[in-house]
Image (cartoon, rainbow, N blue to C red):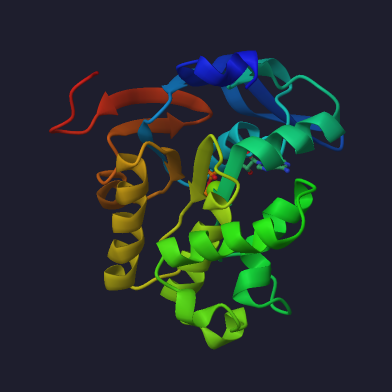
């Protein structure tokens, strides 16, 4: 185990700014963001369209780098080469997207196995891990199916299995119920709550405050800044 293994603060952002350049003009999408998230938290990030949620999520997920400021993920400074950043991302983040992002030509088992292959793992162990993750989301009977043969809710469950299979430090969900009807959406939210109860750290982006109420903490982003950071009712600070 590395030295970072026992760090309680999994996400630590100091004065993060993100400036997009468009030709000769620039736009500051994030402005002096300071954020700290501990292991085991379930956080929703909300805010109106254009507030900077996806920009923030891309930085949290190591898909993009800030223009300035510092982002420490599980004790590691993410100000590193793109290759190293990709390695950190593959090891530490499990992604769930609104539109599932499954590969259509691969079956369910192969889709869930993929993040392990990216980590350089191969062989029967990876198949076993993928099968376990699929079992966890209740889709063991569908491992040979292609994504197109599943319902939206089932596809999102596969995406959850794929996010879990590497045992990531953070599960990052971007509008995970956005493409689902409300009943199926509730099932996906229940699954996220269950995963959080098991100790997983979850960060969910949503524009919907009702959905955000499933999380334990709600952070509001407006015009590139965090404007509120509250615990949802019934939650106490540990
Ligand atoms: N690649 C880019 N180049 C230039 N400007 C960008 C880029 N990406 C985002 N922006 C701008 O940054 C701001 C924040 O965008 P972002 O996508 O983070 O918003 P959001 O909160 O996720 O919105 P939504 O709820 O609509 O998804 C917006 O004004 C957007 O136009
Ligand atoms: Mg967005």
Q: Is residue 230 left or right of residue 16?
A: left
Instruction: Look at the picture and state if 220 lies above or below 211.
Output: above
Residue furthest to the left in view is 234
Camera-side residue: 213 or 120?
120
Q: Nearer the viewer, residue 217 or 7?
A: 7
Q: Residue at x 60, y 16 (%)?
A: 4
Q: Residue at x 67, y 26 (%)?
A: 18
The quadrant in which the N terminus is found is top right
In the rendered image, residue 87, in percent from the top left (x then y), is placed at 77, 36
Where 25 falls versus 238 (above or below)? below
Residue 82, position as x, y percentages in the image: 84, 32
Please state which of residues 167 and 180 is positioned toward the viewer in this rendering: 167
In the picture, which quadrant includes the C terminus?
Answer: top left
Name of the residue lying farthest toward the front: 124
Position in image of residue 226 (x %, y %)? 44, 24
Q: Is residue 52 left or right of residue 126?
A: left
In-image side of 150 versus 2 (left or right): left
Residue 236 placement, left or right of 148: left
């Amino acid at each position: 185990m590395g030295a970072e293994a026992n760090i309680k603060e999994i996400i630590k952002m100091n004065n993060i700014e993100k400036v997009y350049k468009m030709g000769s003009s620039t736009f500051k999408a994030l402005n002096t963001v300071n954020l700290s998230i501990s292991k085991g938290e379930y956080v929703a990030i909300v805010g109106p369209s254009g507030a900077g949620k996806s920009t923030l999520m891309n930085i949290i997920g190591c898909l993009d780098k800030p223009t300035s400021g510092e982002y420490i993920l599980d004790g590691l400074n993410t100000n590193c080469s793109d290759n190293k950043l990709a390695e950190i991302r593959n090891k530490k983040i499990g992604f769930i997207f609104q539109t599932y992002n499954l590969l259509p030509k691969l079956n369910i088992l192969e889709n869930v196995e993929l993040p392990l292959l990216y980590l350089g793992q191969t062989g029967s162990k990876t198949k076993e891990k993928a099968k376990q993750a699929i079992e966890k989301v209740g889709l063991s009977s569908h491992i040979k199916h292609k994504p197109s043969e599943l319902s939206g809710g089932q596809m999102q469950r596969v995406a959850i299995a794929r996010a879990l299979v590497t045992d990531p430090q953070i599960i990052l969900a971007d509008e995970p119920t956005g493409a689902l009807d409300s009943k199926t959406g509730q099932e996906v939210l229940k699954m996220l709550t269950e995963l959080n109860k098991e100790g997983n750290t979850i960060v969910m982006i949503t524009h919907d405050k009702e959905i955000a109420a499933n999380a334990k903490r709600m952070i509001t982003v407006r015009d590139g800044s965090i404007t509120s950071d509250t615990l949802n009712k019934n939650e106490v600070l540990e």
